[in-house]
Image (cartoon, rainbow, N blue to C red):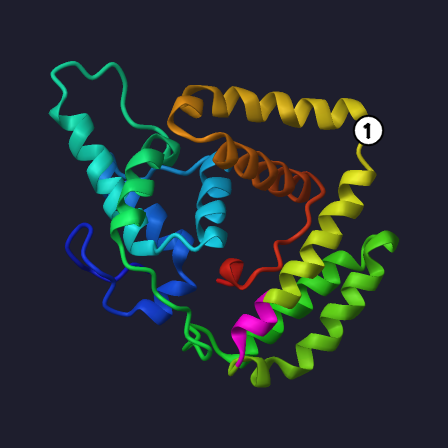
Amino acid sequence: MSNSSAPGAPEPDWPRNYFNYFTEAEEHFQRARGTGLFLLSPLDWALLENWKNAGVPLEAVLKGIDAAFEKWRSRKQKRRHINSIAYCTQAVMEAAQRTPAREHPSQVEAPFEAEQLQAHLQTAAAALRQSDSLAAIAASLDELAPNAAEYLNNLEELERRLTALEEKMVAIVRASQTDAELYALRTSLEAELKPYRGKMSADQISMLERRYLDSALLARANLPRLSLFYLH
């Protein structure tokens, strides 16, 4: 859960929040919106993953969210409420430019125990074994699981391995989709992305499209995300 701190303030426990990137951003957006529970869309999750992978500090994301809402509230005419983190893109990028980059520590204090990490890997492996085409990836996860305690001292290495395995998984799932199914996913993406295209650069849009489609493919196939950022 989020630590209590002033909006936009530097995170007091950054190593722990490094693995709570999505949760911290979601809860901060909900508080800034001020309308109680508000679930993020697939586009929002893809955008957050894009920022996380690009090294955008969580601090910059929180500051950008605050800045976007402050600007919106200052307007005399508010046509509609802010319903997506995508609305905050420009403010987040501006905050990122002003926020000193933090080096990811080689040894990060994990907010979970070895048993939780092992269960995450084993559960994912069990899900993948349901498909013959993903059996090799499941076997790789089975090999990683017994060494969970050792990987607590080198989480970045484990995250790189899981990212590589997930990329293979996405490629296999994509190859199994029909043209019509892929077209439907892109149509859904375009509908969500259209209102925010003017707030993003071409590179940002391209990367976001990839993240969105990858996530949507895995969700449609009822497959788990492997990254440690999805370990709850």
Residue at which label 1 appears: 178
Locate residue 20 relative to residue 151 in the image: left or right: left
Magenta part of the protein: which range? 154-159
> Where residue 139 appears, x then y in whole percent?
80, 69
Residue type highlighted by circle 1? Thr
> Where residue 137 appears, x then y in whole percent?
78, 62
**Foreground pick, 198 / 26:** 198
Q: Is residue 39 visible?
A: yes
**Foreground pick, 112 / 162:** 162
* Residue 76 lies within the magenta run: no
- Kindly give the residue lying farthest to the bottom in the view shown: 150
The vertical placement of 208 against 59, above or below, is above
**Foreground pick, 104 / 68:** 104
Locate residue 183 relative to residue 118 in the image: left or right: right
The vertical placement of 88 against 72, above or below, is below
> Where residue 10 appears, x then y in whole percent?
22, 60
* Identity of the residue drawn at 44% across and 75% down: 110
